[in-house]
Amino acid sequence: MWVQIDKISQYVDKEVTIKGWLYNIRSAGKLMFPELRDGSGLIQGVVSKKEVPESVWDDFQKLTQESSVIVTGMVSKHPKKEDVYELQINNLEIISIADPYPITPKEHGVDFLSEKRHLWLRSPRQASILRIRNEIIMAIRTYMYENDFILFDAPIFTPNACEGTSTLFETNYFDLGKAYLSQSGQLYAEAGALALGKVFTLGPTFRAENSMTRRHITEFWMMEPEMAFFDLNDNMDLIEDFLEYVVQRVVKNRKKELEFIGRDTSKLEKVMKPFPRLTYTEAVEILHKKDIPLIRKTANGEEHIRPFPWGEDFGAPHEEAIVEDFDKPVMIHRWPAGAKAFYMKRDPENPDLVLGVDVLAPEGFGEIIGGSQREDNLDLLLERIREHGLPEDEFQWYIDLRKYGSVPHSGFGLGIERIVSWLCNLEHIREAIPFARRPNRIRP
RNA sequence: UCGAAGAUAGCUCAAUGGUGGAGCAUUCGGCUGUUAACCGAAGGGUUGGGGGUUCGAGUCCCCCUCUUCGAGCCA
């Protein structure tokens, strides 16, 4: 019977067939220990020269790393290890002998592995990360479904920059001129929220920024819920409830994989409601207390400004200093208007502030969520669009949303690869997606 | 885009300005409980590209290319 390796414990003392690839093979004279993988896991096989036909023994000698095989044998418990199973192999069918495999069981540099990404994906660590990514996305979709959100797919070709800030990828669109690859589905999701109440988008987004850091890729997946009649507090309550659900479900369902890749799951188990909520102003006070300066580039080097001036956006060192005292995601809300996008609603109690919220993951993983209550007043929105120098006619449909039954509404965006990085404790975001796109890499 | 470090065998790395090495991978041989197995042997190189200094350059100098890490931008 053909079985998956991850279900092998149900077949002790039974004969099973495994279809997969040779991950590694060790031998000790008349014994061989081929290690097999089938996509679901790894298992060690045992081949004894005196217990198999000579042809099977000879065939095993021919196998190279990543050769594809079908093996049959009896499942047994490992003689020394608890909870580990092996396969007493009695037959082998070779599907294909692999050429010398470039990714050996020794160490490799990250550039080499990226070049061989199509093969690197086969390594148990990468496969585990992608299984966890799958679980994260399943958890997100399940949460959204169970809370009555409607999947609302936003377009990827757009006629203009959504927020007017970052650089976009440009392409030609028939006779209609330039099109840009979407950097966010949010504006469209707002139309969806006013049509369907609660919606979410989940799809790829693109940024043409030349960002060569461990936190950036040019093509990444984002989940963006948008809710009619939600104010900033409703939004933050949702973020909290949602993140707790996703993290706890992933820890529960993928504990094996998380432990395999060396993730300390006890830190994730602490991610339970409520999360700390700080205003931007309170966060700045933390920076003052810790004496973290604003570092500004100047013509001849750097300038360290202390105390950190109110109104400036936070950089990596600031986020780190704010987050280090907490073991849960930190929500920072009510930001200076100058640091944020045009569509965010002003705080009625202080017009210098916008009702935005950023969520910083613990353990220094940085921003995973950015959200806000949206400007729902027609005149104020027009004012913002003009202030930001955005093309008003391109935003006509968006402005319409404030003309025809405008309501308070809110939403946020979650970076899928960012949350994968955090939950898997990844050194670099390139491991969080099957084929990472970075400014210097488009292949494979 | 800016800053720092780096580029040597298929891979990961050594090599005082003086005959370029090791481990893994590959090929061959040995070993009945191996776990990045181990032991023995063999093959494998225009030292990223170009120029310069020198009797002699992987090593020193200049230019270029590429990579990694950090910063900014952000999810």
Image (tube, rainbow, N blue to C red):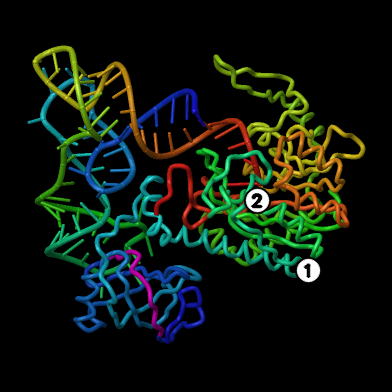
Above or below residue A19? Residue A407 is: above
Nearest to N terminus: mark 1 or mark 2: 1
Image coordinates of residue A254 in percent, x first then y, are: 59, 64
What's the amino acid at mark 1? Asp
Count every numbered label the image shows and give the total.
2
What's the amino acid at mark 2? Ser
The answer to which quarter of the image holds residue A51 is bottom left
Q: Same chain, marks 1 and 2?
A: yes
Answer left or right for A438 relative to A181: left
Query: What is the secondary structure assignment of the residue under circle 2?
Result: loop
- Residue A95 circle label: none
- Residue A184 circle label: 2
By secondary structure, the bulk of the magenta-drawn segment is best described as: strand
Q: Chain of mark 1?
A: A
Q: Is residue A265 magenta?
A: no
Of residues A424 and A353, the one drawn nearer to the viewer in this rendering = A353
Image coordinates of residue B47 in percent, x first then y, are: 22, 34
Of residues A94 and A313, the one drawn nearer to the viewer in this rendering = A313
Answer left or right for A140 relative to A23: right
In the rendered image, which residue does mark 1 sit on?
A148
Per the rendered image, the range of residues in magenta is: A16-26
Image coordinates of residue A328 in percent, x first then y, are: 72, 48
Residue located 66% across and 62% down the image:
A153
Residue located 35% across and 82% down the image:
A72
